[in-house]
Image: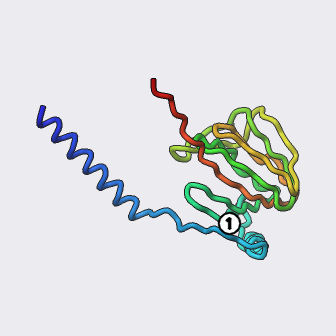
Amino acid sequence: MRLRVLCTILTLLMTAAIARQLTAQNPPPPPKLFASAADVTAMIAKAKAERKPDQPNFIQPIVGLAPYTANLEHRVAGIPAPASVHEREAEMFYVVEGSGTLVTGGKLKDEKRTNAENLTGSGVDGGTPRKIARGDWVMVPEKTPHWFQQIDGTIVLMSIHLPHAPTTTPSR
């Protein structure tokens, strides 16, 4: 019994040490709490200049305070981007400029796991297509397939990933 307790304690201590070491190696990004309109305009110009011809989405961080991030996404017509499902976070879009068709719901085609929290696919079967344009907001709940089915020229979006608070079960 004592040996089992000692092994459990040693395992917990080693796990904590490894977690501290990994956090030290990959610290969260420092908070970026402000971006001016001029900063966003410069980011749009940078995306237009630096996006590679076969790159469907050029993403840059606007502001962030872990675990929340707001990114600027620059997407162009004619280059299909994968569909996504974020299993543990919602995603909110604001259209800065341009327009396109966003499909939400349905089922991912050719589903593949990209990491522990996200899936991608070549598109979405079913779902609800919605034409979006400058000034529109869209909230995509976690576990919901979403895909930009069509881009009309270019679309510039602000995307905000919103980790969903864990649900708690009341104690009895």
Number of numbered discs: 1
Q: Position of residue 3 (x, y in %)?
A: 12, 37
Give the residue drawn at x 17%, y 37%. Answer: 5
**Badge 1 amino acid:** Ile
Residue 94 sits in quarter: bottom right
Give the residue drawn at x 85%, y 42%. Answer: 130
Mark 1 surroundings within 10 Å by alpha-carbon count, few (fewer than 14), some (14 through 19), many (20 or more)? many
Outermost front residue: 172
Does dot 1 land on a helix, a strand or a loop?
strand
Give the residue drawn at x 88%, y 53%. Answer: 133
Relative vertical location of residue 154 with respect to residue 123 in this rendering, above or below: below
In the picture, measured across the screen, residue 130 lies left or right of residue 64, that is: right
Residue 26 sits in quarter: bottom left
Residue 119 is at least partly visible in this image: no
Q: Position of residue 160 (x, y in %)?
A: 68, 54
Q: Position of residue 58 (x, y in %)?
A: 70, 63
Outermost left residue: 2
Residue 98 is at least partly visible in this image: yes
Give the residue drawn at x 27%, y 45%. Answer: 12
In the picture, measured across the screen, residue 29 lies left or right of residue 15, that is: right
Relative vertical location of residue 113 with respect to residue 21 in this rendering, above or below: above
Provide the residue designation for mark 1: 62
Q: The C terminus is located in which quarter?
A: top left
